[in-house]
Image: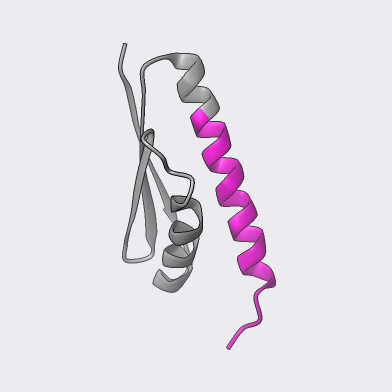
Amino acid sequence: MDINCEISLAYDTETQAIKIQKVVAIDDGSFISSKTKNNTLIAHINSTSLPSFLHTLDDYLACVTVAENVLKREPQK
């Protein structure tokens, strides 16, 4: 079974989307490919089983949450 999913996360600015994407892309591996388009982070998740998909999705969203929290604490220029 192949499971494919696309997640789109919109941010206030393109800069925010790019920063988040750069941080989480380090962990993308072979299951996830991500890119930005304007102020949106777009991630494609591929898996061969439901448990693997759910684990990948949970891990990815946890990493995004951490990156968002760090970005919130970043001094504004």
- Residue beneath the point at 51% across and 24% down: 54
> Considering the image in quadrants, where does the N terminus appear?
top left
Percent position of residue 63, x then y: 58, 47
The picture places residue 52, in percent across and down from the top left corner, at 48, 20
Front in this rendered view, residue 22 or 12: 22
Front residue of this view, candidates 65 and 27: 27
Residue beneath the point at 59% across and 57% down: 67
Relative vertical location of residue 26 with respect to residue 5 in this rendering, above or below: below
76 relative to 59, above or below: below
Q: Quadrant of the C terminus?
A: bottom right
Query: Magenta: predominant secondary structure element?
Result: helix
| Range covered by the magenta-colored residues | 56-77
Q: Is residue 31 left or right of residue 77?
A: left
The reply to whether the magenta stretch includes residue 64 is yes
Within the image, what quadrant is residue 40 found in? bottom left
Which residue is at a point 65% across and 64% down the rendered structure image?
A: 70
Residue depicted at 48% across the width and 45% down the height: 27
Q: Position of residue 44 (x, y in %)?
A: 34, 39
Q: Residue furthest top?
A: 1
